[in-house]
Image (tube, rainbow, N blue to C red):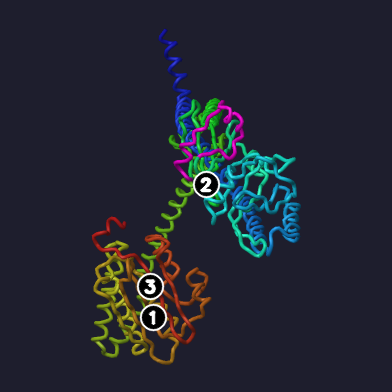
Amino acid sequence: MSKGWDRALDLLRMRSIQFIITASFTFVTVLVMLFVGVMLYSKFSQTAEQNAYLYTQQTIEQVSYNLDRYLNDMTGIFNLVEEKVVRSQNVPDDKLTEQLETIVETRDDIVSLAVFTQQGELISGVPSQAMRKNTKLAWQSWFALAQENPKNLSFSLPHVQNLFKGQYPWVVSMSKSVTIHQNNRQIPGVLLMDVNFKTIDDLSRKVSLGKKGYVYIIDLVGNIVYHPQQQLIYIGLKNENRLLPLRYSYGSYPDDSAEDKRLITIKTVDSIGWKIIGVSYMDEIVTTKKEISGFIFWLLIVVAIIVLLLLSYLSARISRPIKMLERSMKQVESGDLTVAASVKGSHEVEQLSHRFNLMVARIRQLMDQIIAEQEAKRKSELEVLQAQINPHFLYNTLNSAVRMAGIGKKEDVITTITSLSKLFRLSLGRGKPIITVAEELEHIRHYLIIQKMRYKQKFAYEIEAEEAALGCLTLKLLLQPIVENAIYHGIEQMADPGFIRIRAAVIGERILFQVSDNGLGMRPDVCAQILQGEHQSKGGSGVGVKNIHERIRLYYGEAYGVSIESEEEMGTVVSIWIPFIEPKGEEESA
């Protein structure tokens, strides 16, 4: 029993990475999908509802625009007829009749044009048909509206026009009171223009708002001008709630008066005051939202299953190469730097394997580099120690002291020997490669004293140093090879006396040593060769400028070193850059 549990635990440990990856990503994915699903449903539902409202409003706006445009067109024709009737010198006359006939013939939607007296007597009409008896003209709504509002054009509700014999069309009558000329006198009358209602019916009937929605039109007081189910309304089988449209002129409003909840959209035709009402059923909008929710639900289920399967497969692919890479890391941990991981897997794992190999190779490279740098540093220090006691320089100095003693210049001999002893004391420096800037400048001062004794009045020198730089630390014997080159290669062969200027300054976080002379100078290509160690010269200390440049870079890094500026017959300026290090940081620097 115990062995079975151990095997189960081992199996669980082996599959732990895969299980954690699968469970974690599945949990996060499900949460994200639920959040996205809720957001999508909310957004789509809101958008569907807004689109339904917007579509209804745009549809009603379009119907209103078409109807308003058509009624304005009819109003323009009515005004034209009115102008011709008013300007006619005698009504009726043949010219006026001919003009009215032309207007009726060119417009199929104009049923008739007629002029009546205020007593209801027909004066002129097109088409020229007899009126029916007992028409009771005074009872006609359009006739009464023209007399009640003599200055305004009136529109009647749709009705059957039965004034003339032989035709009974469904029309909207346009009427207005006019003044006409008859037998050299002016009499009041009424102008009538019957417009076929079929055009208005067509403009409204073509509109559909969903499967059950529709559009109807009412006038200012709520009378129905048009309704797709007008016959059912007349016989009482259908009823419209016209109180809500009468209360508002524009906008969309919910209507709960019927069993089915509806959305009422209202737009008023400004020219005549009619109101166009669009009726949309809310259950159709809700149905759209249900369809969206159902689609999103099943989409999330399918996506969740696919994601779960993909995550199971990917987690297995990821966990296997990670374990292989772990074994390679353990080999490196044990000290084997010859390991080369060749792990196959996902792109990230392959990149990790590649980076691991680069890291191991870089470690080997750095170890080799450290060994090489230590060897170079030891070699450089050996060369410095060799340069500290240059036999040739010592021989020349002692020889000069003997000659001065022979001619009785005891003071010069004492000065030379004293400077030589201090020079060697500072050069040895108790075996330490690091000294202060003040000690380095003191060393080069004694060196220049000795050289000036040898060369008499061949050159002069000047040493300047900022107070802040004197206490800082530097590698020793940086200046002597530079000054030695300035004397041997720049000033010794000059006819005139030379001048050497040495300066030490603090610039930012660095210290600058600068050795300048007015000697013979050199070409720029020779400067580059000197730094690279490719230029061979006679004499010197044996520790070249290249060696100084490499020593500085070994101790302080690539940002420091030596630079040379020179021009033939103009002299040379050698700049040495080292970091600003105070004595308290000596141990840290080492």
Counting residues from the N terminus, which is met first, the one under dot 1 or under dot 2? 2
The relative height of residue 62 versus residue 323 in the rendered view (above or below) is: below
**C-alpha separation, residue under disc 2 versus residue under disc 3:** 117 Å
* Residue sitting nearer the eye, 352 or 61: 61
> Is 245 colored magenta in this rendering?
yes
Badge 1 element = strand
Q: Residue drawn at (49%, 29%), measured in percent from left and top?
A: 261
Instruction: Please indicate whether residue 8 sits to the left or right of residue 313 in the image.
Output: left
Badge 2 element = strand
Badge 3 element = helix
Residue stretch in magenta: 222-249
* Residue sitting nearer the eye, 117 or 86: 117
Residue 492 picture location, percent across and down:
42, 85
Residue 401 picture location, percent across and down:
30, 83
Looking at this view, name the residue that lies furthest to the bottom.
Answer: 496
Mark seen at residue 391: 3
Mark seen at residue 516: 1
The relative height of residue 195 versus residue 327 in the rendered view (above or below) is: below
**C-alpha separation, residue under disc 3 versus residue under disc 1:** 27 Å
* Residue sitting nearer the eye, 356 or 408: 356
